[in-house]
Image: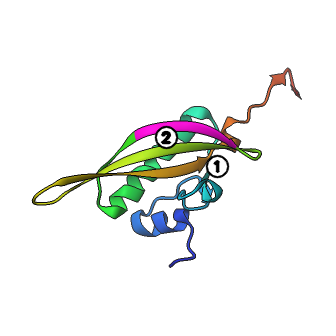
Amino acid sequence: MKNESLRERLFAQFNILLPISGGTGESIENAVVITAEGCARFVEVQFHVLDLVWKARGLPWELHKKSMHEHYDRMIDKLVIKTREVSEHNISYRYENFFFDVTGCLETRLVTGNDLI
């Protein structure tokens, strides 16, 4: 199902609904949008998504590097993932970028009494 979202594909494979929408994470323009609120929660969601994506691929992975980028009016978290493939005669490493749009997770509201500032 090429037109299925990443959320739909992960649900179909693992029966887990994640608080994500948007793209596949393969490019900054096609970032996975995290719909969970709060800093601690979005990091948990990122790692859950990555665990499932690489589990589906049958590859172990580790986070190599993480950096935040502003892309137009969006905050994009770029994660560089390192995977390892072992064959009979060698071990090969591959680095792949994965992008999350965390704009909604980082927006904060200041409240004084009952008023929203």
Q: Earlier in the sequence, mark 1 or mark 2?
A: 1
Q: Is residue 90 above or below residue 44?
A: below
Q: Classify 10 Å Cα crowding around label 1: few (below 14), some (14-19), many (20 and above).
A: some
Tell me which residue sits at (85%, 20%) in the image. Answer: 112
Tag 2's secondary structure? helix
Q: Is residue 51 above or below residue 117?
A: below
Q: Position of residue 14 (x, y in %)?
A: 40, 63
Q: Position of residue 106 (x, y in %)?
A: 68, 36
Tell me which residue sits at (65%, 57%) in the image. Answer: 29
Q: Is residue 88 left or right of residue 111?
A: left
Q: Is residue 104 above or below residue 96?
A: above
Q: Is residue 57 left or right of residue 10?
A: left
Disc 1 target residue: 35
Tag 1's secondary structure? loop
Disc 1 residue type (three-letter) = Thr
Give the quarter of the figure containing the C terminus: top right
Q: Is residue 77 left or right of residue 15?
A: right
Tell me which residue sits at (48%, 51%) in the image. Answer: 97
Q: CA distance from mark 1 to mark 2?
A: 12 Å
Image quadrant of residue 56? Answer: bottom left
Q: Classify 10 Å Cα crowding around label 2: few (below 14), some (14-19), many (20 and above).
A: few
Q: Which residues are magenta?
A: 64-70
Disc 2 target residue: 44
Tell me which residue sits at (64%, 49%) in the image. Answer: 35
**Residue 86 or residue 48, whichever sits in front:** 86
Question: Farthest bottom residue?
Answer: 1
Q: Position of residue 105 (x, y in %)?
A: 66, 40
Image quadrant of residue 80? Answer: top left
Assess whether mark 2 and mark 1 are in contact (beta carbons under 8 angstroms): no
| Residue 8 forms part of the magenta stretch | no
Disc 2 residue type (three-letter) = Glu
